[in-house]
Amino acid sequence: MAFDGSAIQALLDDAVAKGALHGVAAVVVDRKGLLFHHAAGEATTSSLFRNASMTKAVATTAALQLVEQGRLSLDATVESILPEFGRLQVLDGFDGDQPRLRAPARPATVRQLMTHTAGLGYFFVDEKLLRYHQLTGEPTPLSGLKRSLSVPLVNDPGTAWAYGVNTDWLGLVVEKLSGQRLGSCLQQQVWGPLGMNDSTFAPTAEQRGRLLRVMQRQADGTLAPSPHDLPPTSEWDAAGHGSYGTVQDYGRFVQAWLDDGAGILKPDTVQLALQDHLGPIKLPELLKSAMPELSNDVPALPVPQSWGLGFHLTLADLPGMRSSGTADWAGVFNSYYWIDRTKGIGGVLMTQLLPFFDMPVIETLMGFEAAVYQQVGAVVPAA
């Protein structure tokens, strides 16, 4: 039986028709390839998207290739590869308007970069770090300035999960060991081999012409053009947020992870990455926003979850939806993906809208996932 995407198509078209979204594109893939693709509203089948934090999994894939080659150890300290990392201090708080800094209790490891436990934070989900930026005038990663990565840690490495510039530092590790800029490395090792032909850190004028504009949800629920965007140029290929591509490109990446690495990774590396690597560290029940214009508060699902190497993991079967062990993540402009290796199915839904975790998008995303799994029983054979 062929995959019937009519319910998904209607869902996406309806979200645009009622004004919830200005443009949206989605793909569904299995291990063999594309099952469904649709674009609605301002989005077209050739639209380019800011991947934002969906860049993280792709950059982590390049780091895992170096692990496979024996050129990188998960338990190597970051400072043994990048000595400048060893100069970072921990922000303990403030004495009046003076940041209070101290040396970290232990060095961070490459594995901790991959699991967001290296102690690094992001200004928009950490009040302490936001205040540090405001008091010191140090640039944020959205400035495109590389020195934005050298702000203090918010925790001692290995003590807590905190969302931050971990993957940006991992990208610098990849650059140091490969001797290439990250974009060149990904072109050679991931984008090129997988046919992700529009994926880049530096869109051409033609590609920028296909970029879906960013809209901002207003207090009354309507959409207006957003003042926020990625910087037009960046001093570094930002592994944490800096890539662009089409929804089909990202679908090819999801398919590779479904298909035991599809030749870019070994099957046992894929399995290793999609295991719980947090151990006793718990994910926060609420990722609290420090900048409501960029992100809403993000509550955790009330099910067991963890973090693997580069991916968030759901550790329970969700009835009518994803299986236990499914990997996923998202980008700040409200783009989302999941990789369900148990059922051999993955999905990508992309729009360009702020703030993150926008409820109309989340409702569309949940409807999309449920509609995919209504089809899956009928069409996708068990592995």
Image: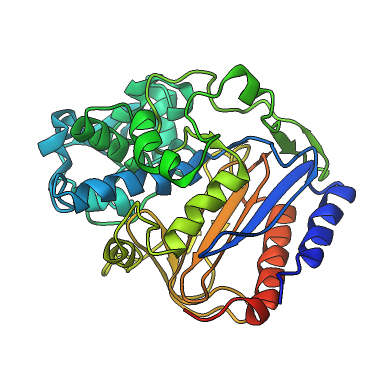
Q: Is residue 74 above or below residue 279?
A: above
- Percent x, y of residue 95: 30, 32
Q: Is residue 322 above or below residue 328?
A: below
The picture quadrant where one finds residue 213 is top right
- Percent x, y of residue 276: 32, 68
Q: Residue furthest right?
A: 17
Q: Residue at x 47, y 32 (%)?
A: 242
Q: Let me know if residue 232 appears in the view.
A: yes
Image side of residue 217 versus residue 191, left or right: right
Front one among 203 and 290: 203
- Percent x, y of residue 250: 54, 48
Image side of residue 48 versus residue 257, left or right: right
Image side of residue 357 versus residue 190, left or right: right
- Percent x, y of residue 319: 61, 82
Q: Residue at x 65, y 67 (%)?
A: 369
The picture quadrant where one finds residue 274 is bottom left
Q: Is residue 269 above or below residue 190?
A: below
Q: Residue at x 60, y 40 (%)?
A: 246
Q: Residue furthest left?
A: 80
The picture quadrant where one finds residue 318 is bottom right
Front one among 16 and 198: 198
Q: Let me know if residue 119 appears in the view.
A: no
